[in-house]
Image (cartoon, rainbow, N blue to C red):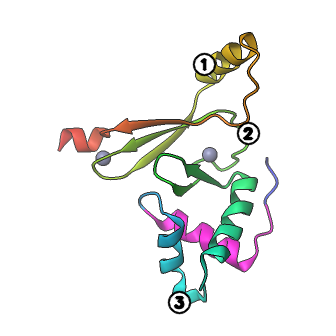
Amino acid sequence: MTATHELTRNQALVFNALTKAESPLSAYTILDRLRDDGFRAPLQVYRALDKLLDYGMVHRLESLNAFVACAHPHCGEHGLIAFAICEKCGQVSEFSDVVIEEQVRDWTGQNGFKPSKTTVEIRGTCASCLNS
Ligand SMILES: [Zn+2]
Ligand SMILES: [Zn+2]
């Protein structure tokens, strides 16, 4: 997905809120931060998030029920995305790994399982928290 997407005002506001955030944000936190910009209802946030998720510009962290801006400029090109979530500072690192992706594909293929979505979330302590 190399095309840049025309974002609506609301989509751009939500995306900027996520880009500026140090850690993942829930839809309600996004709503709170955008009240001054005219956001009033969770649905406005969810609509914008839906599109941003579609575009691959934002990812949903299942275990936190929160959202992060994609760390890659041209996301959607990477297949399987993994997230390392620090439980101390809340920082999230995104990476994609072809080996994990291949193993998931091998297993699902061999077992006749049709995956619709694969989420890898590693929870623990990040390097800087470990060292402090
Ligand atoms: Zn990404
Ligand atoms: Zn940390």
The residue beneath circle 2 is 77
SS class of the residue under badge 2? loop
Question: For mark 3, does the 10 Å Cα neighbourhood hold few (<14), some (14 to 19), or many (20 or more) residues?
Answer: few
Q: What kind of residue is marked 1?
A: Val
Q: Nearer the viewer, residue 73 or 78?
A: 78
- The percent position of residue 98, horizontal first and vertical second, equals 63, 23
The residue beneath circle 3 is 36
Question: For mark 2, does the 10 Å Cα neighbourhood hold few (<14), some (14 to 19), or many (20 or more) residues?
Answer: few
Asked whether residue 123 appears in the rendered view, the answer is yes
Q: What kind of residue is marked 2?
A: Glu
The residue beneath circle 1 is 99
Magenta-highlighted stretch: main secondary structure?
helix
Q: Nearer the viewer, mark 2 or mark 3?
A: 3
Q: Which residues are magenta?
A: 5-21
- The percent position of residue 73, horizontal first and vertical second, equals 65, 50
Which is more N-terminal, label 3 or label 2?
3
- The percent position of residue 88, horizontal first and vertical second, equals 27, 49
Q: Residue furthest top?
A: 110
Q: Residue at x 46, y 51 (%)?
A: 64
